[in-house]
Image: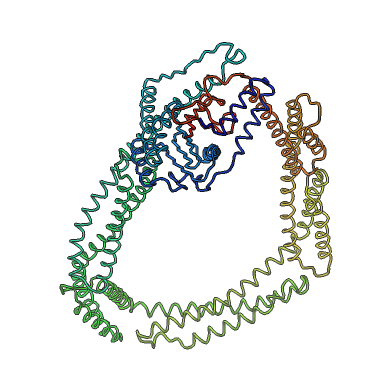
Amino acid sequence: MVVTQKSTVAVRVSKAITEIGRTVAVVVVGSGVLLLSTQGVASAQDALDCSIQTIDSSQSIDIDVVDETIDSERVDLDTTLFYVRVFGDLEPGELADERTDFVDACQDRNWISILVSVDGRETEIDAALLSSQVVDDISRTVMSPSFAEGDFTGGIVDGIQALADEQRRVLEEADETQDSNETSTPVVETSPDQGGGGIGLAALGGTAAVTAGGAGAVLLVKRRRELDQRRNDFGSRLADPQTRAGTAERRYDQLLKQVDVWKRLSKGTTLRELELGHQKADKAHQGVRQDLTLVTKSTPNGVDKASSDELDRASGYLTNLEESLNVQNIALDSLLSVGAKIDHLRVAIPAKRELLLDEVEAAIQLTDTLTAGEWDVTDERNELQKLSSDLNETESDELITDVFDLHIKQEEREASLFAMAHRLQSLPDRAESLRKWRDQLDASHDLELRRIDHSRQRLAELANVHSEDSWRWALEHPAKALGHLESAVTLLRVVNVDNSSSSEFDEVGRTLEAAGLELLAADDLLDQIDDLLVDLDRARIESPGIIEQSKNVLGAFSQFVADHANNLTPELIQSPPQLQATIAELEHELGLARPNYLRVAQTGDRLNREIDGLMIEAQDVQQKNEALRRETSREVARAQRSLQRARASMGWQLFDSPDSEALDQLAQRLLNIPSDPAAGLAAASRIADAAVAIQERIIARRRRNADWVVIGGGSSWSGGGWSNGSGWSGGSTGGGVGGGSFGGSIGGGSFGGGHSSQSW
């Protein structure tokens, strides 16, 4: 019998635990952990790729056959992960290290992994839901004989099938347990002679293995029921899109027949819009069919047997299908709208043409009446006759027509007819309107001329009272306004409404409009002078009061800054002297012989608003900083409490530890936190959090030390460990150290379930 290196280490560790006792056992077991964890590195990095189920670095198996076997077994074990790794360059004992690395990288609550070393003649098998005894029996009796004969493909295939059969049996039993809401935990009784008068580690490990396997199976059944519910929900959700897709398919087929008729009766713009709508509808239709195909193919075995991954993909495709159906409905509605417009215009255009011809005839009769009244409307009559001719030549009576183009032209002719008829009907009143407009412009000219003289006089009076800087910009406004008036007079001289024909009325109206714009420009310049005069008078009267108000507001602000300087920013503290200097400048301005009252009033008003804003800002900053100081005091108190608790968690120590030194440094930092409220709050908070982190680290380390002591408390390795098999030497670790949970204390990790390690 050949014993692997891993089993030798475990036996040595067991003997050390028995002979030395609980305290020393902790050290020995820890050494065993380090020895096991440093046994080599994975022979091939690719072996740790958890996205690949079968990897053979020895070229000893038929990967396709193995993958086909796994796929067939996963039909009803869709939540179980299968992994096969075959190595060809490992020495005896190295496969155990490969298994440790593989467990750390790829372990799952529901998996089956088979690791084979061809050169080392070893096998490592894990099954999350099976016991170690079952896994060991399958490895020894099913797979071992084939490996001994060199048939690695056959041995792995037989092993996968046997493990899968046992997996199904466990799931069925767990299903029954879940239905009855009953769980049972085996109780193992031991006598005092099984290792220091306590429960033996092997018995405890066996119990944990059974309990962990049963709990995992029950959890798996729960997941399978959740998967069934997802399948039902997906089936219900799929029903409506499938119905909509069928309805849209029938609607599209029917619409295509109508589109064919519309195309045969259309040309030009109409045909192009129809073809564009048809293309969009066809593209949307193809999109629906593609998405529906993807939904169907994403569940190849049907929704009732779909896996979780298949349902995820199908749900995404189904969302796309629903969006595509909405797009198709919009495209079909748009295409139908184009066709309905074609049908409507083929009827409406001829009918509207007859109405327009009647209106043209009535307008022609109106021109005859106006001509008898000595109005010259020859141009209008000629335009109406051409319009009548165009309407009579419309192609609306032809079978194949461009109804969209005809509709646009008909709308343009209707607008032209409406404008012409309106002009003819208003012609008798238009001459009178132009005369009144001319008279109003003449009156406005005379008024603006008088305003210019008044503005010049008022501007001359300002020089004795106000600084020239405040009114110099308006000095040329009267001359500019006079220039606009002269331009208006020039335009008005050429207007003679009584001697103008009807065709000249438009030009007369444009001339009067230009003259009116010149008068408006002159009026705007004179309005600016009037506004300036009002502003200067108000500024002269109000400036002293504005300055006095600024002094009062600044006094209140300065007093507030003095009272709360410790809670204000340097900018706010320095602002009162600057504002005082500005007020002094304004007072100096008022003392001049001809002050710029307007600047004083505007600056003083702006200064008052600025001081009000600074007061509000200062009050806000003071309140915030005061609140920050209170919060900093609370945070400092929390940091002090956290430091005290951390020191209490350390207990008595003979020598200073890094944790003790770290706490001393934090205490010193707490005494020197910044005086700035925000910075002090942040510093105190960091110190408190750091103290809590140190306390948690101390508590966690003490708990780990307590766990080592419990593990080392047994003195027997009975009932588990490494067992020998027929043709293979090895055993199961389900009942050994770790209580059926590989890595629970040795090797790290938390993987549970059955494990078999064999050599041939």
Residue 49 position within the rendered picture, expressed as x and y whole percent measured from the top left = 49, 46
Q: Nearer the viewer, residue 265 or 132?
A: 132
Residue drawn at x 60%, y 39% as measured from the top left: 39
Residue 370 position within the rendered picture, expressed as x and y whole percent measured from the top left = 27, 82
Residue 715, placed above or below residue 246? above
Judge from the rendering whether residue 304 lies leftward or rightward of residue 89; answer left or right: left
Q: Nearer the viewer, residue 176 or 474?
A: 176
Residue 628 sits in quarter: top right
Residue 612, placed above or below residue 707? below
Residue 234 sits in quarter: top left
Residue 745, placed above or below residue 542? above
- Which scheme is used to colour this image of the protein? rainbow
Residue 304 position within the rendered picture, expressed as x and y whole percent measured from the top left = 30, 38
Residue drawn at x 74%, y 74% as measured from the top left: 461
> Disc count in the image?
0
Q: Nearer the viewer, residue 351 or 440?
A: 351
Residue 473, placed above or below residue 607? below
Residue 135 position within the rendered picture, expressed as x and y whole percent measured from the top left = 44, 30
Q: Nearer the viewer, residue 146 or 345?
A: 146
